Image: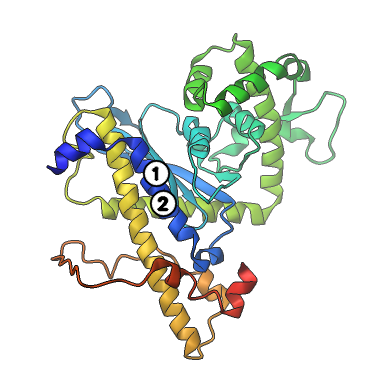
Amino acid sequence: MLSWINRRHITPTLLDRALTKLINLSCGFQLIKAWGSGKSSAFDGTLCYIREENLIAEYHIRYGHRGGIAYHHVSDQYIALFSTFIPCGVWEAVEIIDALLNNTSDIQPDTIHADTQGQSAVVFALAHLFGIKLMPRIRNWKELKLFKPNDAIKYKHIDSLFKDNINWNLIEAHWQDMMQVVLSIKSGTLSASLLLRKLNNYSRKNRLYRAFRELGYVIRTLFLLDYISNIELRETITAQTNKVEEYNQLCDWTSFGALELVAGNDEDEMEKAVKYCDIITNSIILQNIVDMSDIIYQLMEEGHDVREDDIGYLSPYMTEHIKRFGDYFIDIEHRPNQITESAKSLASVKWFQSVV
């Protein structure tokens, strides 16, 4: 019966709506303000095992196994905002714009962190045109080219970092075309992931691809100059990308019971399986937030000094108290506390008022 309901009535869109409700419930708690502002997020992918006799299954050189990638977009407040399933051969950065545009929750980040797989010159350009600050953690970034505005400019001490000049004429010539692409994506006429796949597959003879890439060189050069000179920025990027890696570990802990993602070869079922896992994981996070809020409030009522730094070091990824393999009894007579009451239990505390 459960299998029939899943096939007949459940779609990825409905699962995204359920995930949005969980995100919005978590946003009602003052506690998450201590972990982040909600204005930044990080995305990363993790390998999922699927049947090897499958057109989607590909060998991933980094993981050393065949399968697919579960792609997660996690807020700086530890909450998952978006998820999808992609083949191993797809560049993870192609999903960055779709992830933000499909996010309809109360958490709306404008700064995105990622690893090396989450960036390219074209992605830097497209993110900039959408008003998104792309700040990835790039491996071997010293191998990337840095560009000067023109040949006449010379920089003291750092001129050797720059290898080439920006072709401003190419950007100006195709500026209207690039803006038309952005408007098409914004209106839903064109998918950002589809566009990025096509642009990445096109040769260098494609002038629109070259224009996006040239604009990306500008944005990426500015970012790298800031990255190498600002130690706080590097620490922030590392901290945010660590959060999404910790979330992937929590997802792996949640999705027990089978080695493979799904028992069949249906790509739609793989997408739904990834979203099901996110819903369960976000539910665990929400319950942990509720419990932590109540306990912190009780400690404050007892006169304990709970400092801002103490709250900031907490994480809702705890699992020790969860009976993953135990017996579950449903008591229909028990009425749990209203979430609104738990969410507001810390609202009267002076420190939380200052955070808000």
Residue sticking out furthest to the right: 152
Q: Which one is nearer the viewer's eye here, 210 or 178?
A: 178
**Dots 2, 1 in contact, CB < 8 A:** yes
Across and down, in percent, residue 321 comes to 28, 70
What kind of element bears circle 2? helix
Q: Amino acid at mark 1?
A: Arg
Residue for point 33% across, 39% down = 63
Q: Quadrant of the C terminus?
A: bottom right
Residue for point 61% across, 32% down = 124
Q: Amino acid at mark 2?
A: Lys
Residue for point 48% across, 26% down = 193
Q: Relative to 25, is 214 on the left or the right?
A: right
What kind of element bears circle 1? helix
The tag on residue 272 is none
Across and down, in percent, residue 337 comes to 35, 72
What residue did someone put label 2 on?
21
Whether residue 72 can be seen here: no
Q: Quadrant of the N terminus?
A: top left
Q: Relative to 344, is 352 on the left or the right?
A: right
Question: Residue 340 lies in what quarter of the image?
Answer: bottom left
Q: Relative to 352, is 215 on the left or the right?
A: right
Question: Residue 326 lies in what quarter of the image?
Answer: bottom left
Whether residue 21 can be seen here: yes
Neighbour tally class for label 1: few under 14, some 14-19, many 20 plus, Cα within 10 Å:
some
Residue for point 59% across, 38% down = 141
Q: Is residue 319 above or below residue 91?
A: below
Across and down, in percent, residue 64 comes to 30, 36
Q: CA distance from mark 2 to mark 1?
A: 6 Å
The tag on residue 17 is 1
Across and down, in percent, residue 26 comes to 45, 60
